[in-house]
Amino acid sequence: MTDAMIFAPHPDDAELGMGGTIALLTQQGMKLIVVDMSNGEPTPYGTPEIRAKERDAATAALGLAPGQRLILDFPNRTFVHDIEGRHKLAALIRTHKPRWIFAPYMPDAHPDHVAATRMIEDARFDAKLTRIDLPGQPHYPERVIYYFATHLRVHSAVSFCVDVTGTYERKVRSLEAYQSQFYLNRGEQAGAVVEMLRVRDRYFGTRIGSLYAEPFYLHEPLGLKGLKEIL
């Protein structure tokens, strides 16, 4: 059993949307798996080799072991929501049996993110089916939780926020690992994405009385065992 499986269309999406939460849950001893659905290439200043090194450095910065991060072979920029992709993800879900799944929030301007989230949602359903040509036993994760790595720059439907004050600098270090994506050849805009996220997460921190927080969304109700669990 795995506590959470975080699906990211490209390396750096998980860090952008919920790097602080990944570091926090890891610190708390929860079993996580991050699944990068593609290697992220091509990009203007990256190569598969560069991106792999950056990904490894980001993984270490978040406190994850190498075996807690998987990479699939979906093609960057041309994700397609189809049965083959759904079943590929469903097989992973049945193998690792996560309690929760994390996926990119929709709507989004990036077609890969849209197609990825639709596949993830359908894979959750497919993974519970019997009499289907998939490995392992049927499994149905309790929740799909959506993180914000949207290219629309909107956060209009936030269900809850996680206080990531104690692990925020780990998130920053994980993003700084992606030099080819956020720093190289950017001139005065080098690091602008990382700074934008710091401002965003500082804002959501003010909403819950902390220094930094990451926002999340659910379609389904989230249960509490008591009001003491609310910050």
Image (tube, grey):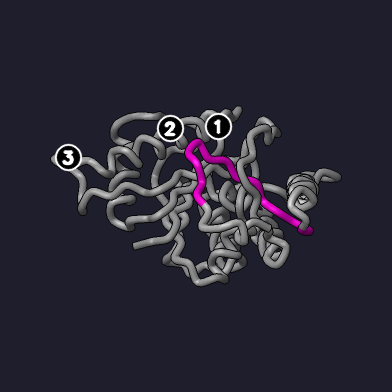
Q: Mark 2 sits on what residue?
A: 118
Give the answer, above or below, for where 96 lies relative to 158. Answer: below
Q: Which residue: 44% across, 38% down?
A: 75
Q: Which badge, 1 or 2, is on the more N-terminal residue?
A: 1
Q: Where's residue 47, x and y in %? A: 55, 49
Q: In which quarter of the image is residue 25?
A: bottom right
Q: Which residue lies furthest to the left in this view?
A: 131
Q: Mark 3 sits on what residue?
A: 132
Q: Where's residue 196, x and y in %? A: 78, 45
Image position of 18 (left or right of 193)? left
Q: Mark 1 sits on what residue?
A: 106
Q: Which badge, 3 or 1, is on the more N-terminal residue?
A: 1
C-alpha span from label 1 to label 2: 9 Å
Q: Where's residue 98, x and y in %? A: 38, 55
The answer to which of 122 and 80 lies nearer the viewer is: 122
Q: Which residue: 63% across, 34% down?
A: 157
Characterize the local packing of mark 1: few (<14), some (14-19) or many (20 or more) Cα atoms within 10 angstroms.
many
What amino acid is found at the position of numbered circle 2 in the picture? Arg
Q: Does the magenta stretch include residue 216?
A: yes
Can residue 39 be spotted in the picture? no
What is the chief secondary structure element of the magenta stretch?
loop
Specify start and end residues of the magenta stretch as a single range. 210-223
Image position of 141 (left or right of 78)? left
Characterize the local packing of mark 3: few (<14), some (14-19) or many (20 or more) Cα atoms within 10 angstroms.
few
Q: Which residue: 43% across, 60% down?
A: 3
